[in-house]
Image: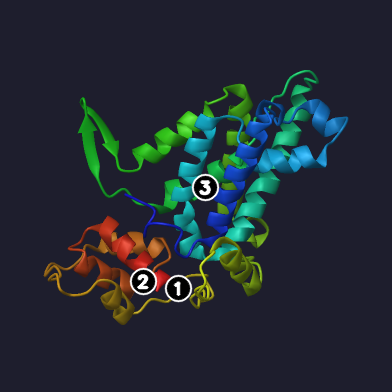
């Protein structure tokens, strides 16, 4: 299982966010200030520092956290491709702000003015993304290692667990707050899932994060639900019929799984036919069609 087509194709917001996290982490790491970025009760309620607040959103406090964090952010670019850059930008802003609110509430309850209780980094966004990952990304492969059963999603969960426990209490609290933020987004509180930024936001990030000399790709048209209306012709162009499609009718539950991810039913069926009923391959076909 992967996050769809390789690279940051059709995911300019994710690319910009990943680059920002890497640059902030390297910058403060060189200065030896990474471990000073964690927010505490004193920072929030006594001497709020705006630069520290902004830096704490992007900069990880250690190299291992940076590696696991960027890996997860890179994988979760699949959600930007699924709902579009303008809605994904809202998801990012909502996750960061709501998780920060929960973190402030937790600091107010704990009231420890001497310790840095919260590690730095985009924990709110990363762990908010685990909510749609759990509900919307299907398991396509099961396997056993030393008698223990794993799925192809297990590696993402393990990376998340490693990041969640990387600084113990300092990272555990932001991770939990991120999960709460993702849950509220999924519950569509205040109808947040319908909100999206204007189209120029996606264009801005495309130009900002894509340094090629050519014109940045135009975002595909989307329907009212925020999903790309695929056609059979698009799927066939993405997945040429050089390889004979399966003659077996795709299972209804596989079609339903792809539809629940936001894909059109007819396109989902066609992709499954060409992928020989491999739901993971069919998902990649549909994501490739979106990027064209």
Spatial CA distance of label 3 from label 1 is 21 Å
- Residue beneath label 2, please? 289
Of mark 1 and mark 2, the one earlier in the sequence is 1
Residue at image location 45% in from the left, 73% down from the top: 228
Residue 137 coordinates in the image, percent (x, y): 39, 52
> Is there any visible trace of residue 261 in the rendered image?
yes
Of mark 3 and mark 1, the one earlier in the sequence is 3
- Residue beneath label 3, please? 129
Q: Label 1: few (<14), some or many (≥20) within 10 Å?
A: many
Q: Are marks 3 and 2 in contact (CB under 8 Å)?
A: no
Along the viewing direction, whichever of 180 and 124 lies nearer the viewer: 124
Spatial CA distance of label 1 from label 2 is 9 Å
Residue 86 coordinates in the image, percent (x, y): 60, 66
Residue with the most extreme top position? 114
Residue 110 found in image quarter: top right
Q: Are marks 1 and 2 in contact (CB under 8 Å)?
A: yes
- Residue beneath label 1, please? 228
Q: Are marks 3 and 1 in contact (CB under 8 Å)?
A: no
Residue 61 found in image quarter: top right
Nearer to us: label 1 or label 2? 2
> Is there any visible trace of residue 59 in the rendered image?
no
Of mark 3 and mark 2, the one earlier in the sequence is 3
In the structure shown, which secondary structural element does the residue marked by tag 3 occupy? Answer: helix
Along the viewing direction, whichever of 289 and 224 lies nearer the viewer: 289
Spatial CA distance of label 3 from label 2 is 23 Å
In the structure shown, which secondary structural element does the residue marked by tag 1 occupy? Answer: loop
Residue with the most extreme bottom position? 233
Residue at image location 70% in from the left, 47% down from the top: 97
Residue at image location 15% in from the left, 73% down from the top: 242
Q: Is residue 236 left or right of residue 203?
A: left
Question: Is residue 142 placed above or below 275 in the rendered structure?
Answer: above
Residue 237 coordinates in the image, percent (x, y): 28, 77
């Amino acid at each position: 299982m992967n996050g769809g087509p390789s690279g940051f194709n059709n995911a300019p917001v994710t690319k910009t966010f990943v680059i920002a996290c890497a640059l902030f982490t390297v910058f403060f790491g060189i200065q030896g200030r990474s471990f000073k970025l964690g927010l505490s009760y004193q920072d929030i309620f006594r001497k709020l520092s705006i630069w520290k607040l902004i830096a704490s959103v992007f900069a990880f406090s250690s190299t291992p956290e940076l590696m696991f964090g960027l890996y997860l952010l890179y994988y979760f670019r699949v959600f930007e491709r699924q709902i579009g850059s303008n809605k994904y930008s809202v998801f990012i802003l909502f996750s960061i702000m709501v998780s920060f609110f929960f973190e402030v509430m937790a600091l107010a309850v704990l009231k420890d003015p001497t310790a840095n209780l919260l590690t730095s980094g985009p924990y709110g966004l990363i762990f908010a993304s685990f909510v749609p990952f759990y509900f919307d990304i299907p398991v396509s492969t099961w396997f056993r290692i030393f008698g223990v059963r794993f799925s192809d999603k297990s590696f993402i969960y393990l990376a998340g667990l490693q990041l969640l426990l990387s600084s113990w209490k300092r990272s555990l609290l932001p991770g939990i707050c991120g999960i709460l933020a993702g849950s509220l987004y999924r519950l569509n509180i205040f109808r947040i899932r319908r909100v999206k930024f204007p189209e120029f936001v996606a264009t801005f990030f495309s130009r900002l994060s894509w340094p090629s000399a050519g014109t940045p790709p135009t975002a595909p048209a989307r329907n009212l639900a925020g999903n790309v209306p695929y056609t059979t012709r698009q799927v066939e162009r993405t997945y040429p019929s050089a390889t004979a499609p399966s003659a077996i009718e795709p299972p209804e539950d596989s079609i339903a799984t792809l539809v629940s991810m936001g894909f059109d039913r007819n396109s989902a069926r066609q992709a499954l036919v060409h992928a020989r009923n491999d739901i993971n391959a069919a998902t990649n076909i549909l994501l490739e069609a979106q990027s064209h």
